[in-house]
Image (tube, rainbow, N blue to C red):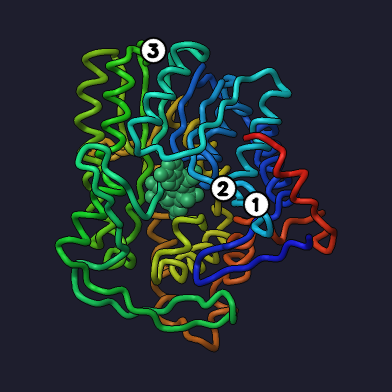
């Protein structure tokens, strides 16, 4: 089968296994050629198959202390004409590379929000893996079944300050179009907090503590985004911002508990805006990203997932130069937030229109990153080659 990128709006529907493999290898190579740090011995990464979670796993295993990892994700393998999801392949190729170096790399594919998943992972830690000293919470999901009330909550990417009209990129037609982010209902806000807030992170940490599978000094981090003023309407003051505030509140509560019980730590890390499966889907956000990339690439400070994540662990979490704000948040987004960067982004934001967006923004870079989420547009891959999905279907994550 010849696999081509198929996408609808900001969602990729196909994935190319060879491209995914190459990109996992590229990230591994990046951290191997970089400075390393004295990091976790055994880590649990919730949301490990793509974006920030995958970069975290790679940095820890190949650029840290050769960390053994457990990765949880929600992905699908190939079936019939369906290619399977990129994260499915990322799990497989990460594991292959880690095991080759003698590391433990266990994948759990299923619903991290469920109690069954928590039980299964805890059982594995107790019986085979050993206590963990780092837990990373990097989930991004559109829905969550609350295991306690049994209800399914659907998160919404909406505003709370009235309808917002703004530009967005039409990736199919390579045009700039206007998009409306609608105003949220109370119900939308509540549901988004349920899905993307800290409730599930808290359930995980409490379950791990209860089962006594956290090492003394264990630390846990969840990823958030704060972003500059220009994105407040769609992010910080939107439904997702409400959820992230809940996540931050949870971090403070968990920090108290972990400190007291294990001399451990819980915090959020505010990461840079990047193209991932989750962020490509946020209305209007892509245009901000195309302008940010342009400015940061010109300044020489642009980072992708692996560069950003590796710096977070190397300099901050396991390093001597943490940037922590007065709210206790780690701030690897410091380069995105620099004043001159944001001034330029603001200037370009005022100018951008359907005629000039390809010149004044890094639309090309953004689109390439987007296609690479599915393993497309990767150098050295022959996309005209027939891919035997049945062979790939036999690989076990
Ligand atoms: P992503 O879509 O690449 O990763 C999400 C991960 O969650 C995947 O591994 C996916 O399989 C997993 N997942 C989703 N639902 C699941 C479920 N029910 N059970 C198990 N696994 C499930 O997204 P990302 O951008 O890497 O997001 C990770 C975190 O980083 C989020 O909290 C996000 O808000 C934050 N963040 C993202 C950006 C950005 O610009 N992309 C910036 C700062 C912070
Ligand atoms: Na992730």
Determine the residue positioned at 50% across, 19% down: 42
**The residue at label 1 has a CB less than 8 Å from ligand 1:** no
| Percent coordinates x, y for residue 382 in the rendering | 83, 58
State the residue position of label 1: 79
Tag on residue 191?
A: none
Mark 1, residues whose alpha carbon is within 10 Å: few (<14), some, or many (≥20)? few
Instruction: Identify the secondary structure beneath mark 3.
Output: strand
CB at disc 3 and ligand 2 closer than 8 Å: no
Please name the residue that numbered disc 2 is placed on.
76
Tell us which disc is closer to us: 2 or 1: 1
* Whole-percent x, y for residue 285 in the image: 41, 66
The answer to which quarter of the image holds residue 360 is bottom right
Left or right for 141, reference 53: left
For residue 397, say whether it is visible: yes
Residue 292 in the image: state x and y as whole percent: 48, 64
Determine which residue is flagged by label 3.
215
The answer to whether residue 333 shows anywhere in this view is no
* Residue 63 versus residue 2 in the image, above or below: above
Helix, strand or loop at mark 1: loop
Circle nearer the viewer, 2 or 3: 2
Please name the residue shown 37% across and 28% down the image. Answer: 118
Q: Residue at x 51, y 55 (%)?
A: 276
Q: Nearer the viewer, residue 223 or 80?
A: 80
Query: Would you say the residues marked 2 and 1 are in contact, meaning their CB atoms lie under 8 Å apart?
Result: yes
């Amino acid at each position: 089968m010849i696999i081509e990128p198929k996408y609808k709006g900001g969602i990729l529907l196909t994935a190319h296994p060879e491209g995914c493999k190459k990109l996992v290898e590229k990230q591994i190579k990046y951290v191997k050629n970089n400075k390393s740090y004295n990091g976790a011995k055994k880590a649990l990464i919730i949301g490990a198959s793509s974006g920030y979670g995958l970069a975290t796993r790679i940095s820890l295993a190949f650029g840290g202390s050769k960390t053994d990892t457990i990765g949880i994700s929600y992905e699908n393998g190939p079936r019939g004409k369906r290619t399977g999801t990129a994260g499915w392949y990322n799990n497989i190729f990460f594991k292959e590379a880690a095991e080759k170096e003698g590391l433990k790399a266990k994948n759990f594919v299923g619903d991290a929000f469920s109690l069954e998943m928590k039980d299964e992972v805890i059982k594995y830690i107790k019986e085979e893996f050993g206590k963990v000293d780092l837990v990373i919470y990097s989930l991004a999901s559109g829905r969550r079944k609350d295991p306690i009330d049994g209800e399914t909550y659907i998160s919404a990417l909406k505003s709370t300050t009235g309808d917002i009209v703004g530009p967005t990129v039409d990736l199919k037609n390579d045009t700039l179009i206007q998009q409306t982010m609608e105003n949220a209902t109370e119900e939308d806000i509540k549901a988004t907090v349920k899905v993307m807030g800290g409730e599930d992170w808290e359930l995980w940490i409490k379950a791990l503590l209860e089962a006594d599978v956290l090492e003394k000094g264990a630390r846990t981090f969840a990823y958030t985004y704060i972003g500059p003023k220009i994105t407040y309407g769609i992010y910080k003051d939107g439904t997702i911002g409400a959820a992230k505030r809940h996540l931050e509140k949870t971090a403070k509560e968990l920090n108290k508990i972990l400190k007291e019980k294990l001399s451990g730590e819980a915090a959020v890390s505010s990461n840079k805006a990047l193209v991932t499966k989750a962020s490509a889907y946020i209305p209007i956000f892509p245009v901000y990203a195309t302008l940010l990339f342009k400015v940061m690439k010109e300044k020489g400070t642009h980072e992708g997932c692996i560069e950003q994540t590796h710096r977070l662990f190397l300099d901050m979490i396991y390093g001597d130069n943490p940037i922590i704000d007065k709210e206790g948040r780690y701030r690897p987004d410091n380069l995105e937030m620099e004043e001159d960067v944001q001034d330029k982004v603001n200037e370009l934001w005022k100018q951008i229109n359907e005629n000039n967006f390809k010149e004044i923004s890094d639309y090309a870079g953004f689109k390439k990153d987007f296609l690479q989420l599915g393993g497309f547009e990767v150098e050295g891959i022959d996309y005209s080659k027939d891919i035997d999905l049945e062979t790939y279907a036999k690989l076990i994550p």
